[in-house]
Amino acid sequence: MTDGLLLVMGSGLSSAEGLPGMPELALHLINASSSLDSAFNTIWAPIQKELEGGAGLEAALHTHPPPVELEDWIVSKTTEFLLPTERDVISSVLSGSRTLRLSKLLNHYLPPTAGLPILTSNYDRLVEVACELAGYHVDTTAIGVYAGDFDHNRSCLGSCKKLKYRGKTPILDHYPRAVVLKPHGSFDWYKSEKGPRRCSVDLDAPRLIITPGLNKYRAGYEIPFDKHRELANSHIQKASRLLIVGYGFNDDHLQVHLMQRLRDGTPCLILNRSLNDTVRTLAKECPNCTALSRPTNWDGVAVLTNDTQFEHQGANAWDLGVMVEEFLQ
């Protein structure tokens, strides 16, 4: 819980805090499709058929990549669906009626001078809120919160409190800092005539978020997604330990580098409510990977690592908040 740790936060963490997950989003898109122009109904129809047949949203959009105009509609409906719940969760946190799981974890973390890298595929801002409430300066790679320009070098200096010396070598001394990297975008990223901007106000402007499916690989090479992906991969390569929460390894943008580190023997703990085939294979084959999940028949934790699998009845230690309470407090 100090230097060398990389946190990877997936949609499962946001779902645990009350935000709808991918299945609920897929249902919302199906229900909202009646508002589509007739020109797009024909394009949407096979996507909806895949969803109704049980395919996930990622798989459906891989099979039937939407044109840019339909992709913009998906972004709009995704934002419309998730923002109210995000606002409710943040309101309850700021009112003191709840504490985010990630804040509980960070309260037991010894922040490194170089900053704690947190990689998330989520659009919402629960990670940023959790970090700030735990006393961390959040480096989003943007300068400012109302018309923030993306400038990684300048944003890194935002947490600097003084200059100190190691011998004759000057060193920047930072406040506790979290470097939050969002290669799929964020609800506070917007398109503008002056380029991408970060704004905490809810604007009537196109948001910069990448929807699931093949089109994200095209969008991933645009500003600011490219820088966040580059920094994310750099931190993955440098990490000496990995804590992965609610992430299913369904994203080629990130998982290629993550899976390689796991196969190289980098110590890793994965916390997921349930394990898909990819995570099961990683936990079985990677030498220092342990996956915790929910048992089928009772409260407790199912542990999978190497060729060993067992269940322990009791505390739900696969849940990040419970894990902190059981092992760190």
Image (tube, rainbow, N blue to C red):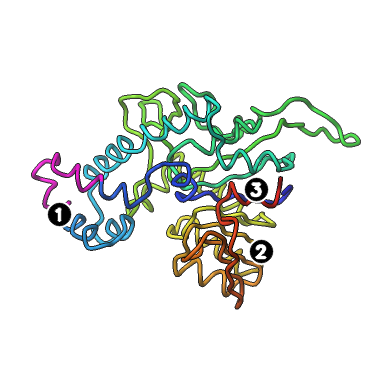
Binning the other alpha carbons within 10 Å of mark 1 as few (below 14), some (14 to 19) or many (20 upward) gives some
User: Magenta stretch: residue 261 in it?
Assistant: no
Q: Secondary structure at mark 3?
A: helix
User: Magenta stretch: residue 29 in it?
Assistant: yes
Q: Main secondary structure of the magenta part?
A: helix
Q: Residue at x 37, y 33 (%)?
A: 83
Q: Nearer the viewer, mark 3 or mark 1?
A: 3
The earlier-in-sequence mark between 3 and 1 is 1
Measured in 3D between alpha carbons, the distance from the residue under mark 2 to the one under mark 3, in whole angstroms, is: 22 Å
Q: Nearer the viewer, mark 2 or mark 3?
A: 3
Q: Could you tell me the amino acid type at mark 2?
A: Thr
**Residue hosting label 1:** 45
**Residue hosting label 3:** 324
Q: Is 153 on the left-hand or right-hand side of 10?
A: right
- Residue 96 spot, x, y in % from top left: 55, 27
> Above or below — where is 202 with respect to 319?
above
> Above or below — where is 154 with respect to 18?
above
- Residue 60 spot, x, y in % from top left: 27, 58
Q: Residue at x 17, y 51 (%)?
A: 44
Q: Could you tell me the amino acid type at mark 3?
A: Val
